[in-house]
């Protein structure tokens, strides 16, 4: 069974503070790692698609790193704002005996307190 | 540019019934994937359609079937509904058969089985 684990499950952060959370995935047969942001009552929105070990990607105040050898990715948010409140999902692209699929973690629910 | 649309938004069915959910992909996209999100879990991959054929399938029973039309829109059908089928069903579109491309999600259809 392929497991993608995210921690913590939920997080409350004061506005202006920086925060980070983790996605753990299998270190073998790596193809890609996705991060999505899912705001309440909206559709999940892609933040990053990461494919190379050591990759670092940035979009505004949000950045992500990738370590495929040890099987983890970090998502960082600098200077949190109320609009950052959302569930952040990571997804590991799995290829197993020809079968391909995105396997999602359960998400980290982030709440920014004003 | 219209994003991914899904219909209906909400649906209530009883056990044993059949349901059809619909998805229109983002303009220019030719691949549609379906996911089931149960409460407290991440989205789980059901199947993917490309060129009107089911190309990949997750661990879902044959009660779950689908179709893709020449205009790339797609349907998800679930037969003999069970209480456990109650979930949010997400449709995602992308370009090309390779699943690790960025996915664009619709807002989902909330299915309740009584």
Image (spheres, coloured by chain):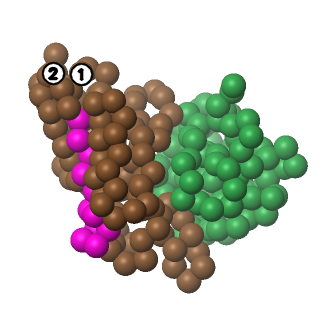
Task: Please tell me which of labels 1 and 2 falls first in the chain.
Answer: 2
- Residue A77 can be seen in this image: yes
In the picture, measured across the screen, residue A56 lies left or right of residue A113, that is right
Residue assigned mark 1: A81
Left or right placement of residue A50 versus residue B88 in this view: left
The quadrant in which the N terminus of chain B is found is top right
Q: Nearer the viewer, residue B19 or B17?
A: B19
Residue at screen point 50% across, 34% down: A43
Q: Is residue A74 magenta?
A: yes
* Secondary structure under the numbered disc 2 in the rendered image: loop
Provide the letter of the chain coloured brown: A
Residue B57 bears which disc, if any?
none
Residue B32 position, x and y percent, is 68, 51
Q: Residue furthest bottom?
A: A97
- What residue sits 70% from the left and 40% below the top? B25
Bin the neighbour count of mark 1 within 10 Å (Cα to Cα): few under 14, some 14-19, many 20 and up.
Answer: some
Label 1–label 2 contact, CB within 8 A: yes
Q: Residue B67 location in percent, x, y?
A: 78, 55
Q: Is residue A31 magenta?
A: no
Segment tinted magenta in the rendering: A67-77
* SS assignment for the magenta stretch, majority: strand
Image coordinates for residue A24, horizontal then vertical, percent: 27, 62
Q: Which chain is green?
A: B
Against A39, is B29 above or below? Answer: below
Q: Is residue B83 visible?
A: no
Residue at mark 1: chain:
A
Disc 2 packing (10 Å; few <14; some 14–19; many ≥20): some
Figure disc tally: 2
């Amino acid at each position: 069974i392929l497991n993608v684990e995210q921690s913590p499950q939920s997080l409350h952060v004061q506005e202006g503070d920086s925060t980070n959370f983790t996605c753990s995935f299998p270190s073998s047969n790596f193809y890609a790692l996705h991060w999505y942001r899912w705001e309440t009552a909206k559709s999940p929105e892609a933040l990053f698609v990461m494919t190379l070990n050591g990759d670092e990607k940035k979009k505004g105040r949000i950045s992500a790193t990738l370590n495929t050898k040890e099987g983890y990715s970090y998502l960082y948010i600098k200077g949190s704002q109320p609009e950052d409140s959302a569930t952040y999902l990571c997804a590991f692209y799995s290829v197993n005996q020809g079968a391909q699929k995105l396997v999602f973690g359960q998400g980290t629910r982030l709440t920014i307190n004003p | 540019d219209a994003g991914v649309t899904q219909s209906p938004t909400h649906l209530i069915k009883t056990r044993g019934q059949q349901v059809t959910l619909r998805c229109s992909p983002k303009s220019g996209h030719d691949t549609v994937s379906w996911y089931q999100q149960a409460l407290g879990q991440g989205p789980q991959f059901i199947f993917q359609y490309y060129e009107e054929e089911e190309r990949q399938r997750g661990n879902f029973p044959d009660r779950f079937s689908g179709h893709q039309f020449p205009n790339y829109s797609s349907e998800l059908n679930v037969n003999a509904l069970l209480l456990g089928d109650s979930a949010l069903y997400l449709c995602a579109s992308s370009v090309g058969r390779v699943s690790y491309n960025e996915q664009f999600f619709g807002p989902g259809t909330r299915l309740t089985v009584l």
